[in-house]
């Protein structure tokens, strides 16, 4: 599913297509510091597997993935929406900032906010959700700065690379539809 580009003052969220899967992107997914809270760390990541992954998302009727482009041209991460549950009018979102030098600069916060604003305008969604490993403090802050509230905790849900089981914080945000 393709959604319209989302343009902010210093970044653009643009539909990510298989041809944009690069060695740099694969490097993010293979980097233990970047992938420590992602499921992809348990997979053998290849150019073909990631192109297929992106292709499947784009072919889906209820999911979309954007590249996050700093200054509208340099890709620094991705943000995914879906699968959208049209019956219950909700969807999860997930974000990856792959360029470590851009951590802590508000890019995730801005991207999450821009995506939520767009979903409010173009969809009938009632709620967006996220699941974040409790030790991923930057991601938790980015969601909470956008009005997500902690709705629950899945205890010892995520096996970290160091063999420690970690909690996953469930977050949610109601999309405000009042005039």
Image: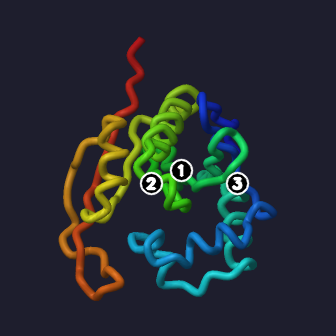
Position of 7 compared to 141: left or right?
Answer: right
Residue under label 3, please give it. Answer: 16
**Residue at x-position 81% and y-position 63%:** 19
Q: Give the foreground label among 1 and 2.
A: 2
Report x, y in % for residue 151.
Answer: 22, 49
Secondary-structure class at tag 2: loop
Q: Which marked residue is nearer to the observer: mark 3 or mark 1? A: 3
Is residue 171 in view?
Answer: yes
Task: Mark 3 vs mark 2: give the one in front.
Answer: 2
Tell me what residue is drawn at x 41 percent, y 22 percent: 177
Q: Quadrant of residue 88?
A: top left
Q: Position of residue 149 (x, y in %)?
A: 25, 42
Quadrant for residue 132, please give it.
Answer: bottom left
Residue occupying image coordinates x 35% and y 45% = 143
At label 1, counting other C-alpha atoms closer than 10 Å, the crowd grade (few under 14, some 14-19, many 20 or more) is: many
User: 145 above or below 62?
Assistant: above
Task: Please tell me in which quadrant of the rendered image residue 22 appears.
Answer: bottom right
Label 3 sits on a secondary structure element that is loop
> Residue 118's x, y, as percent?
55, 32
- Asked if the residue under mark 1 is in contact with the one under mark 3, i.e. CB atoms within 8 Å, the reply is no
Q: CA distance from mark 1 to mark 2?
A: 21 Å
Q: Which residue is mark 2?
A: 103
Of residues 164 and 85, the one drawn nearer to the viewer in this rendering: 164
The numbered dot on residue 81 is 1
Disc 1, SS: strand
């Amino acid at each position: 599913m393709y959604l319209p580009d989302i343009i902010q003052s210093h970044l653009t969220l643009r539909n990510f297509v298989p041809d944009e899967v690069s060695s740099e992107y694969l490097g993010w997914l293979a980097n233990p510091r970047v992938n420590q809270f992602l499921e992809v760390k348990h997979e053998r990541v290849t150019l073909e597997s990631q192109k297929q992954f992106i292709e499947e998302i784009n072919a889906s009727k209820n999911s979309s993935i954007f590249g996050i482009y700093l200054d509208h041209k340099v890709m620094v991460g991705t943000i995914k929406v879906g699968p959208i549950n049209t019956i219950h009018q909700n969807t999860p979102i997930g974000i990856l900032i792959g360029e470590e030098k851009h951590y802590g600069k508000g890019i995730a916060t801005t991207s999450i906010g821009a995506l939520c604003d767009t979903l409010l305008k173009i969809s009938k969604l009632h709620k967006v959700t996220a699941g974040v490993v409790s030790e991923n403090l930057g991601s938790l802050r980015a969601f909470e700065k956008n009005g997500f509230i902690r709705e629950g905790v899945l205890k010892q849900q995520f096996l970290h690379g160091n063999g420690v089981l970690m909690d996953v914080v469930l977050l949610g945000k109601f999309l405000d539809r009042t005039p």
